[in-house]
Image (tube, rainbow, N blue to C red):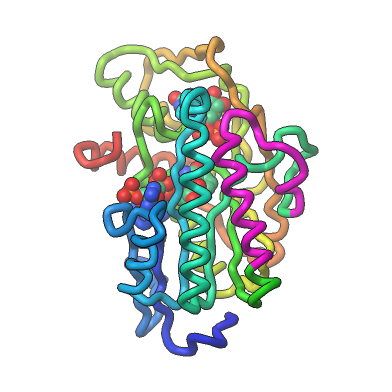
Amino acid sequence: MGSEINAGPMCVLVTGGSGLVGKAIEHVVQKEGGKHEGEQWIFLSSTDADLVDVGQTRAVFEKYRPTHVIHLAAKVGGLYLHMRENLSTQNVYIRDNIKINDNVLQTAHDMGVTKVVSCLSSCIFPDKTTYPIDETMIHNGPPHDSNFGYSHAKRMIDVQNRAYFQQYGHRYTAVIPTNVFGPYDNFNIENGHVLSALINKTYKAKKEGTPVNVCGSGAPRRQFIYSLDVGRLIIWVLREYEEIDPIIVSVGEEDEVSIKEAVDMIAQALDFKGKIQFDTTLSDGQMKKTACNSKLRRYLPDFTFTPLKEAIKMTCDWFMTNYDTART
Ligand code: NAP
Ligand code: GDP
């Protein structure tokens, strides 16, 4: 790794360390030998510092003096949260996320952080595009309307990474995960992403003997990736990946499934035998956003992704065991 400034063991600051992806990285670090001897890993939540605020960002960096940063913190939400807020507060998504990203990257620069790995998302890709989408196509046209604020703010991370390299030679890079799910996700029915919202809906429907209401037609297709796989891959990127250009972190195109197929897996995992109905008056959002993982495969031809059915089952089991403390 380009560790010309910090030669000793890494001190890794993980922003957004209390979220879905942050908790997965913490698990890999603590339970799967992801931490090397002498290293320090710090997982931040918004209560440690509101990263929208530059003073709080500087204070938390000064407290821990990281050599490396994994930057996950973001104001995020599923399709329907984005669409609702589109009408009134889409501007908040742009401004808060731009501020968070700029505060983190510039403070990292000011404090001589060797490497930053930030998190983009496959929903920031152009809406009108050819498929599969790859890393070179991020800026080739406007993103989907439903989350344009979040998407434009995220795209700027890639622009800033290039600028920090050009001007200072910093190795600040980014990963582009497709749809992530797993333990510690936001399982809120109104605001969550599709799998977590549907796991909660199905769990409730089973308890109450009611049907599960799936939003939209069930036809849109997504590449779902288990959060622990994302955690393992982000740690690999931190240690091994030398490029500034981002890398898509996703299962293959052949593993893309429809929302309907995913709901059926949830029903099976929760042993739900009731009715599943599709509310076609609600938006489908992007019909697909198929991403190409060939770059990742060139680096890691043998990486094994957790099979979707197995990962959904583990997430359902986690949700039921942790229902009282899960984000619902
Ligand atoms: P998440 O579960 O919603 O967690 C968000 C994290 O950001 C939490 O730790 C939260 O802290 C922190 N945060 C939010 N606002 C903050 C602020 N103003 N100051 C400091 N911290 C703040 O999100 P996630 O799903 O793990 O997402 C992590 C990253 O992956 C994000 O950058 C997201 O865009 C990207 N991503 C996610 C997906 C997905 O499907 N979930 C897909 C692709 C990319 P609190 O817990 O204190 O609120
Ligand atoms: P996206 O992948 O960025 O569009 O975000 P989501 O994780 O919110 O997934 C949205 C897709 O799942 C759309 O096709 C929705 O129609 C579908 N979907 C079905 N039921 C739900 C639900 O209960 N919540 C959410 N967020 N999406 C749902």
Q: 209 or 163, which lies in front?
A: 163
In this picture, residue 123 sits left or right of residue 181: right
Instruction: Give the image location of residue 175, x and y in percent.
Output: 58, 57
Instruction: Give the image location of residue 16, x and y in percent.
Output: 39, 55
Residue at (76% x, 33% y) in the render: 128
When the figure is inspected, residue 211 is found, relative to residue 20, above or below; the finding is above
When the figure is inspected, residue 321 is found, relative to residue 209, above or below; the finding is below
The stretch drawn in magenta includes residue 176: no
Q: Work out which quarter of the rendered image holds the C terminus and state it.
A: top left
Residue at (29% x, 38% y) in the render: 327
Q: 188 or 317, which lies in front?
A: 188
Instruction: Give the image location of residue 18, x and y in percent.
Output: 33, 53
Q: Which residues are magenta?
A: 136-163
Q: 17 or 261, which lies in front?
A: 17
Quadrant in the picture for residue 67:
bottom left
When the figure is inspected, residue 103 is found, relative to residue 320, above or below; the finding is below
Instruction: Give the image location of residue 88, x and y in percent.
Output: 47, 25
The stretch drawn in magenta includes residue 141: yes
